[in-house]
Image: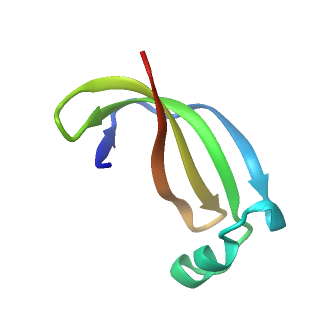
Amino acid sequence: MRFEIITPITGAVVIASGSGVRIRQHLNRSYGSGRWRKMKGFATVRLADGTISDAEIHWFEAHGLGRRDLKIKRLIP
């Protein structure tokens, strides 16, 4: 799903870190080794069809490598 984040991500919390990140090997191969964390937060997004909505967003991040693989988990009415 293609989307654009309009507002800054708020309420970011760590869901998993270290060996708790199941796809850690994939992340290391694709983006480089780091201390990967799975995160979640909330933001306003613009979907591909132009609809603007609040959403819960999940992503992976590592220090020095930034946010990777952002995805919308659910839209908030």
Q: Residue furthest top?
A: 77
Q: Is residue 42 left or right of residue 18?
A: left
The residue under the point 61% across, 67% down is 64
**Residue 22 in picture, x, y percent from top left:** 71, 66
Q: Residue furthest bottom?
A: 29
Where residue 33 sits, quadrant-wise, is bottom right
Relative to 59, is 68 above or below?
below
Relative to 27, is 44 above or below?
above
**Residue 21 in picture, x, y percent from top left:** 73, 62
Relative to 50, is 26 above or below?
below
The residue under the point 65% across, 69% down is 23
The residue under the point 28% across, 25% down is 52
Relative to 24, is 55 above or below?
above
**Residue 73 in picture, x, y percent from top left:** 51, 39
Q: Residue furthest right?
A: 19
**Residue 51 in picture, x, y percent from top left:** 22, 27
Q: Is residue 46 left or right of residue 10?
A: left
- The one nearer the camera, 37 or 25, is 25
Q: Is residue 2 left or right of residue 14?
A: left
Q: Quadrant of the C terminus?
A: top left
How does the figure colour the protein chain or chains?
rainbow
